[in-house]
Amino acid sequence: MLANAEWIVSKKGPQTFFLFEYHFPDGSHLTEPEEAFLQHVGLIGDNFSLETTVGQPTMIWRGLNRGIERIELVRQ
């Protein structure tokens, strides 16, 4: 995760940016069909901004490069 300087200074914009990815040593992991699907739709291997609001159960990921525009995670 990389903190957003604008958020640190003026509390505007997303709090952080991150790359959603995983890493396995070469040859130690076979890509499953489900993983391949998530890569093709733009979840795995994409950059996201992250936004949260104090006191709210919601976290929003906004895709920055590919197919996913927004993921809203809500704590139940």
Image: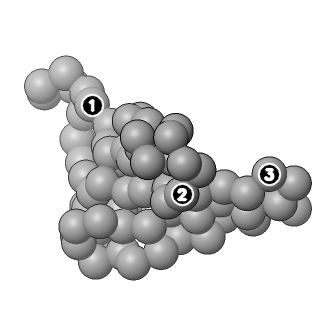
Q: Is residue 40 above or below residue 50?
A: below
Residue depicted at 47% across the width and 75% down the height? 70
Residue depicted at 54% across the width and 48% down the height? 10
Quarter of the figure with the N terminus: top left
Lower position in the chain sequence, tag 2 or tag 1: 2
Callout 2 amino acid: Lys
Residue depicted at 32% across the width and 37% down the height? 22
Quarter of the figure with the C terminus: bottom right
- Graded by Cα atoms within 10 Å as few (under 14), some (14 to 19) or many (20 or more), the crowding at tag 3 reads few
The residue labelled by disc 1 is: 23
Q: Nearer the viewer, residue 37 or 70?
A: 70
Badge 3 marks a residue whose secondary structure is loop
> Pointer 2 and pointer 1: residues touching (CB < 8 Å)?
no
> Pointer 3 and pointer 2: residues touching (CB < 8 Å)?
no
Discs 2/1, front: 2
Callout 1 amino acid: His
Q: Is residue 24 above or below residue 57?
A: above
Residue 36 placement, left or right of 10: left
Badge 2 marks a residue whose secondary structure is loop
Lower position in the chain sequence, tag 3 or tag 2: 2
The residue labelled by disc 3 is: 54
The spot of residue 54 in percent (x, y) is 80, 51
> Pointer 1 and pointer 3: residues touching (CB < 8 Å)?
no
The residue labelled by disc 2 is: 12
